[in-house]
Image (cartoon, rainbow, N blue to C red):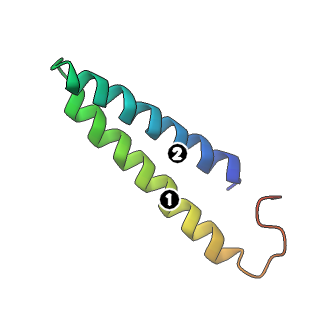
Amino acid sequence: MKYWIIIVVFLLGYSITIVGAMLRVMHWPWGSEMIVSGSLAEALAVLLLAIKVIINRKSNSFLNS
């Protein structure tokens, strides 16, 4: 898995969380669900990044693959 995929998943989760927070502040429906799903996407991206770093620990190029 490439690093850019992990970055895209994290940014997608971040944007969903921000939109969900705005919906929650305005008391519109689906705000809480969007916050939870965005946070889960961010957690998934962090987990994938941790796995990628552990697997490629001995490599000299951290973000070049």
Report the number of numbered marks: 2
Q: Residue at x 69, y 46 (%)?
A: 4
Q: Residues within 10 Å of mark 2 (few under 14, many from 20)?
A: many
Sequence order check, earlier mark of 2 and 1: 2
Residue 62 at x, y = what percent? 77, 66
Local SS, label 1? helix
Local SS, label 2? helix
Question: Quarter-wise, where is residue 44 in the image?
Answer: bottom left
User: Where is mark 1, residue-wise?
Assistant: 46
The quadrant in which the C terminus is found is: bottom right
- The circle on residue 62 is none
In the rendered view, does 37 fall on the left or right side of 54? left
Asked if labels 1 and 2 touch by Cβ distance under 8 angstroms, the answer is yes
In the rendered view, does 56 fall on the left or right side of 64? left
Question: Quarter-wise, where is residue 58 in the image?
Answer: bottom right
Amino acid type, label 1: Val
Q: Residue at x 52, y 45 (%)?
A: 10
The answer to which of 7 and 2 lies nearer the viewer is: 7
Q: Residue at x 69, y 53 (%)?
A: 3
Determine whether 41 is above or below 43 in the image.
above
Residue 15 at x, y = what percent? 46, 32
Residue 24 at x, y = what percent? 21, 27
The quadrant in which the N terminus is found is: bottom right
Can you name the residue that lies furthest to the bottom here? 58
Q: Residue at x 71, y 79 (%)?
A: 57
Amino acid type, label 2: Phe
Question: Quarter-wise, where is residue 61 in the image?
Answer: bottom right
Give the CA distance from mark 2 to mark 1.
Answer: 8 Å
User: Where is mark 2, residue-wise?
Assistant: 10
Residue 42 at x, y = what percent? 44, 49
Q: Residues within 10 Å of mark 1 (few under 14, many from 20)?
A: some
